[in-house]
Image (cartoon, rainbow, N blue to C red):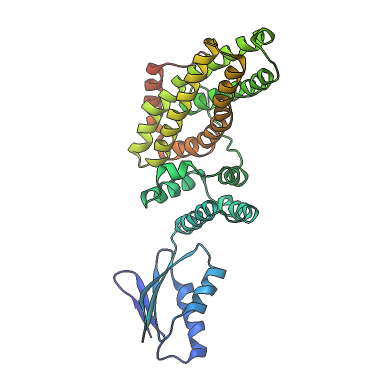
């Protein structure tokens, strides 16, 4: 018998006195009447596993199933209709779990496309923040395999942010474009260095490597404006984990950019050892820096524009001006 809502926003449904052929219809009548965030409590005289299978098939990611009692006489189950965002959170958590358990990549990729297709960058970042708060470490989140990032790119595509020159986010995204050009040049130079046998045949490429490395280190000013101005503002408005993850990525990238700059300017070693070390540092930068930029351009920055009030951006701009800009920052 349905008793109606309780103070905890739960609808109770006692099935024990109902004929079996009436139970299914009554369950879904109550389920369909629930609003997002509401819960139905089923009291049954056997384990409702077939019902659970049906919910998994028809409402995957849109419900939460929790046993309160499991026999021997009665089974009590709470079924919650996920509020906006909760379903996506469960789907993403399951996706991450499957990715790390070595599930079939093709199946995960296809499922991931559907998961990420209808979620905004802000929702995605906040869901990942919730997942971290629930126990997933930042390191685990950072170590998501390439497939996860590929799924994100296929699902989200690229976000086109239309802002006037001078807006802090416009400046950061324009700097990203220049940085990506340096990454492309780095990939070309490293490939050329690997095709030669000694320093005498790569003098121009060595100068180019120095130029690239110096400008990648110069990009630390870009990171500083994010770390000292943008990230604290995001944290002020409740967005904590995405900036924290970006900070950790900055740290790892800075170490390798600095090391690359040092070896590019002091290459007094065997040529083969020099190339090996350069390749080791460059390969990390070539892979991770574009990925980092993608996440900032398509998740972090759109989220910042959504959660930070419009009247705060003038202050952010003034604080960025105090820190200064990169030698390659486009005119604002």
In the image, taking residue 126 as reference, residue 268 lies left or right, namely right
With respect to residue 168, does 214 lie above or below?
above
Residue 85, percent from left and from top: 46, 55
What residue is rendered at 39% in x and 18% in y? 323
* Percent position of residue 73, x then y: 36, 87
User: Along the line of sight, which residue is nearer the eye, 91 or 323?
Assistant: 91
Nearer to the camera, 83 or 89: 89
Q: Is residue 82 above or below residue 198?
A: below
Please say if 74 is above or below 108: below
- The image shows residue 157 at horizontal and vertical percentages of 61, 41
Given residues 37 and 278, the one toward you in this image is 278
Say left or right for 80 vs 236.
Answer: right
- The residue located at (48%, 27%) in the rendering is 253
Residue reaching furthest to the left: 7
Q: Residue at x 57, y 16 (%)?
A: 212
Residue lying farthest to the front in this orientation: 270
Q: Nearer the viewer, residue 173 or 57?
A: 57
261 relative to 65, above or below: above
Image position of 254 (left or right of 72): right
Q: Quadrant of residue 208?
A: top right
Q: Position of residue 123 (x, y in %)?
A: 47, 48
Quarter of the image where the N terminus is located: bottom left
Q: Is residue 329 visible?
A: no
How many numbered markers are drawn? 0
Can you tell which quarter of the image residue 15 is in?
Answer: bottom left
Q: Say if residue 218 shows up in the picture.
A: yes
């Amino acid at each position: 018998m349905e008793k109606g809502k309780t103070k905890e926003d739960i609808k109770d449904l006692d099935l024990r006195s109902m004929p079996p052929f009436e139970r299914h219809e009554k369950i879904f009548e109550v389920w369909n009447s629930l609003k997002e965030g509401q819960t139905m409590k089923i009291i049954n005289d056997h384990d409702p596993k077939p019902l659970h299978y049906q919910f998994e098939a028809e409402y995957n990611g849109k419900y939460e199933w929790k046993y309160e009692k499991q026999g021997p006489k009665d089974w009590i189950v709470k079924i919650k209709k996920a509020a906006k965002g909760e379903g996506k959170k469960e789907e993403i958590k399951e996706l991450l779990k499957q990715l790390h358990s070595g599930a079939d990549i093709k199946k995960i990729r296809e499922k991931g496309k559907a998961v990420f297709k209808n979620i905004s960058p802000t929702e995605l970042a906040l869901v990942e923040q919730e997942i971290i708060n629930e126990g997933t470490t930042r390191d685990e989140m950072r170590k998501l395999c390439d497939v996860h990032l590929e799924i994100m790119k296929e699902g989200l595509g690229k976000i086109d942010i239309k802002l006037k020159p001078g807006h802090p986010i416009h400046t950061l995204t324009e700097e990203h474009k220049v940085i990506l050009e340096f990454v492309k040049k780095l990939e070309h130079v490293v490939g050329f260095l690997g095709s030669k046998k000694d320093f005498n045949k790569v003098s121009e490429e060595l100068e180019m490597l120095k130029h690239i490395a110096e400008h990648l280190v110069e990009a630390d000013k870009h990171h500083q404006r994010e770390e000292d101005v943008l990230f604290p503002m995001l944290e002020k408005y409740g967005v904590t984990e995405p900036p924290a993850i970006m900070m950790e990525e900055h740290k790892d990238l800075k170490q390798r950019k600095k090391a690359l700059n040092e070896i590019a300017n002091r290459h007094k070693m065997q040529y083969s050892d020099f190339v090996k070390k350069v390749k080791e540092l460059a390969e990390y930068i070539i892979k991770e820096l574009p990925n980092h930029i993608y996440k900032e351009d398509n998740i972090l920055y759109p989220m910042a524009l959504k959660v930070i009030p419009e009247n705060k951006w003038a202050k952010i701009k003034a604080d960025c001006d105090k820190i200064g800009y990169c030698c390659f920052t486009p005119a604002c």
